[in-house]
Image (spheres, rainbow, N blue to C red):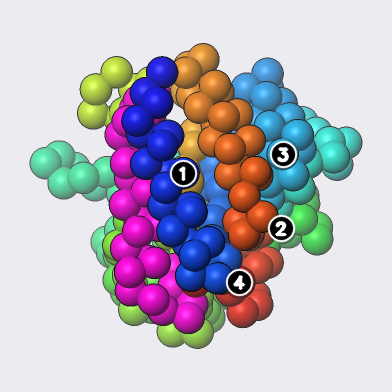
Amino acid sequence: MNAAAWVGLQKELEAWAETGRSVSLWWRDDDAVADSHALRTLTAISGEYDVPLAMAVIPAPLETSLPAHLRRCQAPVSVCQHGFAHVNHVLAPLKKCELDAANPTQRLKQLAAGKAQLEGAFAAAFSPVLVPPWNRIAAPLASRLHTLGYAGLSTFAEQCFPAAALRQNNCHVDIINWRGTRGFVGQEAALAALTRHLRRRRQANLEHGEVTGVLSHHLVHDEACWLFLDRLWSTLRRYSHTVFCSLADLFSQDLPGG
């Protein structure tokens, strides 16, 4: 256990407290399609610490077991859209992308169909927010999302797209080591990314900066991922000036805190 990394996060939270500003964070989990043991572990953590969870659901392979579970569970979960089928449409050496620019009319048609499917399956739990698979979307598509009724767009890190009338809030801490073990990235790396983004926001002293987002992928979590998420939310819950944002907070209302 890397005690120094946790101390660094705690010191940053204390620095925020000295400013008198709230620390706003959010949690997104990608690739949901069905009920599973991993998904139940995910929602159990969300419910235990009362941390809103933004679940990015892939429409095409969606199974009825997922909305059924969310109707039963008591966790504060809302649903956004994770592309259409999570299928790669480009050839190597280009990076994987479902929402490429090759056939914009077809891509937009698929997105609209997926959005309608999720609206029907999840009703009020669904928010019209698009999370592109692999966090990539061609700029011409992003610029037309508002015509399909989307209110928000979420990718990763510092990406920003020309998306008229859409709010954009990304995630900044990915707990999976995709280029290595494809398991937990490690406490030091995860906490360093989290602390770094919080520090940058604090030092910028903006009234409303981009909310710090934590990204998980429940289907590939190892035990270390689950232990980290459990400790992370329990640690953050001890600080009265931390605010955990839902999709509605992020994409429909004024953002709390800095």
| Residue visible at 48% across and 70% down in the picture | 19
Segment colored magenta: 184-212
Q: CA distance from mark 4 to mark 2?
A: 21 Å
Q: Nearer the viewer, mark 2 or mark 3?
A: 3
Q: Label 4: state its secondary structure.
A: loop
Q: Amino acid at mark 2?
A: Phe
Using the numbered discs, state the Cα–Cα distance from disc 1 to disc 4 in whole angstroms. 20 Å
Specify which label sits upstream in the sequence, 1 or 2.
Answer: 1
Q: Give coordinates of residue 117: x percent, y percent.
A: 69, 54
Q: Which residue is mark 1?
A: 10
- N-term mark: 1 or 4: 1
Circle 1: element type: helix
Q: Residue at 67% of width from left, 24% of height from top?
A: 41
In this image, 121 relative to 99: left or right?
A: right
State the image quarter where residue 81 is shown: bottom right
Q: Which residue is mark 2?
A: 126
Marks 1 and 2 sit apart, C-alpha to C-alpha, by 34 Å
Tell whether position 208 is magenta: yes
> Label 1: how many residues lie within 10 Å, few (<14), some (14-19) or many (20+)?
some
Q: Can residue 51 be seen from the camera position used here?
A: yes
Q: Nearer the viewer, mark 4 or mark 2?
A: 4
Residue 16 magenta-highlighted: no
Residue extending furthest toward the top? 223
Place of residue 59 in the rendered image (x, y in percent of width and height, measured from the top left) = 60, 46
The residue at which mark 4 appears reads as 256
Please, what is the three-letter code of the amino acid marked with disc 4? Pro
Is the stretch drawn in magenta largely helix, strand or loop?
Answer: helix
> In this picture, is 65 found above or below 106?
above
Instruction: Name the residue: 58% across, 38% down.
Output: 235
Name the residue type under label 1.
Gln
Q: Going 48% across and 81% down the picture, which residue do you hit?
A: 207
The outermost residue toward the front is 18
